[in-house]
């Protein structure tokens, strides 16, 4: 049986503890999946405290050496009662498995790539629980739209105390930037006033800003943003000496004044955490300012400010801020794809869930009436998910159908003339044989780097991806396969 639990971390902790107790009483094993290793370690500490006699172990995705080997063999033999980990832990063999728990089922960190395989461990956990006839408990501060649509709101177990479901334990304050000049939109006067009072009283503050460095580099001739050559994420300009760096994969590049694609002059646009730090030192010259990437949980005395481009719930829990501020809500709510509002809504809930009661939660934006923020302030998860399901219906986006994104990359233009036409004909033939399937595209883009790569992306919508891939492999084998320097990337429901 699959159950979906929505509520605060205390409520989810009680539910997980109850699941461990029932598994131990039944003489079985529990497998707990988490989006971050730190969260898995914390869960095992709570289990060890509540059940001193239980045998527990952690799985670090094959990176734990001898410890991972012992966990693998111990869980397979039945000598370990509770195992916790990320990603590949869902495949751990078990001797007497009775339940699987997925904490933070909505977190996109559950969907990752290991080698050539990309999968969502939440969906694998559900399928494994069905095959092995065991319980599957999905827990989240705010549920994913897919799970709400699949199981219906009647199947969601909410915590009994209705107050804990909302954000009444926090002071949520949206700050409207529309009337402010551009020079005050990064650190608004209202934010500076509250920040000054917070650190003046010895409190701590976390400022969240998605962009690192000082700014980003933008070509004034072809309008291309300088991208990472490995993961294609916008590079952050750190400085003349440090050059550019990628927040996602860590790639570092020397500073350049010319675009690698067209040779046009680069100009710096936007504001990153480096710019935020420079401004803060101007307003608060004596204040301790640290970066989330370098803070290792050491004790801090007095008021201080932590800057982070991607704060995690464990970081917020350890830092215990009196103030949490999102500096660029417009970037958070900007509609990059059909999941943008869902991701923004879930981010707000994850951060709020990790904060202590009485914490001030500030969101700076020019769009204070946007759907994610409005529903978050109202504490209304159900209405938001229902709205998302309805809005995706016209184009049959997930959860109505699955989305397969297929991308081809090559150097030069040789393959675009013939290859994409033939591939489109193949997709048309497959979609005609698989019910409720269609494809759109291709979308052509020029990439950065030298030699420059071009890409062609196909979007495929289908209700039965398994059948679609079987037909695709048959068509690929009988007609042609990508080759001659053509690189193929494919993923299901990637956003």
Image: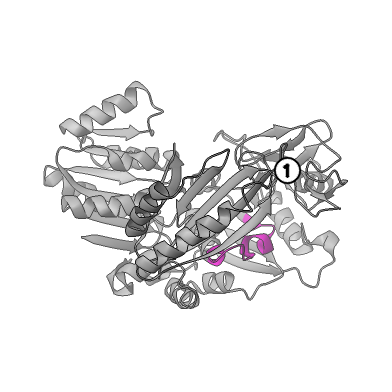
202 left or right, relative to 183: left
Task: Provide the residue span drawn in magenta.
Answer: 324-341
| Relative to 95, residue 468 above or below | below
Visible residue check, residue 356: no
* Left or right: 292 as drawn, with respect to 404: right
Q: Is residue 168 placed above or below 84 in the rendered structure?
A: below
Q: Nearer the viewer, residue 127 or 406?
A: 406
Q: Quadrant of residue 40?
A: top left
Q: 385 above or below 402?
A: below
Q: Residue placed at 66% from the left, 46% from the top?
A: 414
Mark 1 closeness class: few <14, some 14–19, many ≥20 residues within 10 Å: many
Between 219 and 487, the one lying in front of the other is 487
Residue 55 left/right relative to 106:
left
Determine the secondary structure under disc 1. strand
Q: Is residue 276 left or right of residue 76?
A: right
The x and y percentages for residue 367 are: 68, 72
Give coordinates of residue 146: x percent, y percent: 39, 65
- Count of residue discs: 1
Residue 53, horizontal then vertical, whole percent? 19, 34
Residue 236 makes an appearance in the image: yes
Image quadrant where one finds the N terminus = bottom left
Outermost residue on the top side: it is 66
Structure colour scheme: one colour
Picture coordinates of residue 388, whole percent (x, y): 48, 73
Q: Looking at the image, which residue sits at the far left? A: 26
Q: Which residue is mark 1?
A: 236
Q: Quadrant of residue 56?
A: top left
Q: Is residue 41 magenta?
A: no
- Give 425 or 224, whichever is nearer the viewer: 425
User: What residue is at 63 percent from the left and 60 percent from the top?
Assistant: 332
């Amino acid at each position: 049986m699959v159950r979906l639990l929505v509520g605060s971390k205390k409520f989810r902790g009680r539910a997980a503890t109850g699941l461990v107790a029932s598994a131990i009483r039944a003489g079985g094993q529990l497998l707990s999946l988490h989006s971050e290793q730190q969260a898995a370690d914390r869960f095992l500490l709570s289990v060890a405290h509540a059940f001193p006699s239980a045998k527990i172990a952690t799985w670090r995705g094959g990176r734990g050496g001898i410890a991972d080997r012992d966990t693998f063999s111990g869980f397979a033999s039945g000598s370990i009662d509770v195992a916790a980990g990320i990603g590949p832990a869902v495949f751990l063999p078990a001797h007497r498995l009775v339940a699987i728990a997925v904490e933070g089922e909505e977190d996109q960190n559950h969907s990752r790539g290991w080698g050539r395989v990309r999968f969502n461990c939440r969906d694998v956990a559900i399928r494994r629980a069905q095959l092995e006839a065991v319980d599957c408990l999905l827990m989240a501060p705010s549920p994913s739209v897919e799970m709400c649509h699949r199981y219906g709101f009647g199947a969601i177990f909410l915590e009994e105390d209705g107050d804990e479901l909302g954000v009444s334990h926090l002071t949520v304050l949206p700050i409207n930037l529309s009337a402010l000049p551009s020079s005050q939109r990064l650190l608004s006067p209202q934010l500076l006033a509250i920040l000054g009072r917070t650190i003046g009283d010895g409190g701590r503050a976390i400022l969240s800003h998605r962009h690192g460095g000082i700014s980003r580099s933008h070509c004034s001739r072809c309008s291309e943003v300088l991208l990472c050559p490995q993961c294609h994420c916008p590079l952050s300009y750190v400085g003349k000496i440090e050059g550019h760096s990628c927040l996602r994969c860590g790639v570092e590049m020397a500073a350049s004044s010319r675009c690698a694609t067209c040779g046009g002059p680069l100009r710096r646009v936007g504001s990153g955490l480096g710019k935020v730090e420079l401004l803060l030192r101007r307003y608060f010259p004596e204040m301790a300012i640290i970066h989330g990437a370098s803070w290792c949980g050491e004790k801090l005395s007095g008021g201080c400010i932590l800057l982070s481009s991607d704060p995690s719930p464990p970081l917020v829990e350890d830092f215990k801020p009196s103030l949490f501020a999102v500096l660029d809500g417009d970037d958070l709510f900007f509609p990059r794809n059909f999941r943008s509002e869902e991701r923004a809504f879930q981010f707000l809930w994850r951060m709020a869930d990790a904060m202590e009661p009485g914490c001030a939660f500030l969101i700076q934006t020019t769009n204070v009436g946007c759907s994610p923020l409005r529903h978050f302030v109202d504490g209304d998860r159900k209405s938001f998910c229902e709205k998302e399901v309805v809005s995706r219906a016209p184009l049959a986006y997930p959860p109505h159908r699955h989305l397969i994104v297929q991308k081809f990359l090559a150097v030069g233009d040789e393959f675009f003339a013939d290859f994409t036409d033939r591939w489109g004909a193949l997709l048309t033939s497959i979609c005609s044989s698989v019910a409720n399937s269609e494809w759109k595209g291709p979308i052509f883009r020029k990439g950065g780097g030298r030699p420059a790569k071009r890409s062609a992306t196909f979007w495929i919508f289908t209700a039965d991806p398994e059948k679609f891939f079987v037909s695709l492999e048959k068509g690929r084998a009988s007609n042609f396969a990508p080759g001659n320097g053509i690189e193929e990337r494919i993923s299901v429901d990637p956003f």
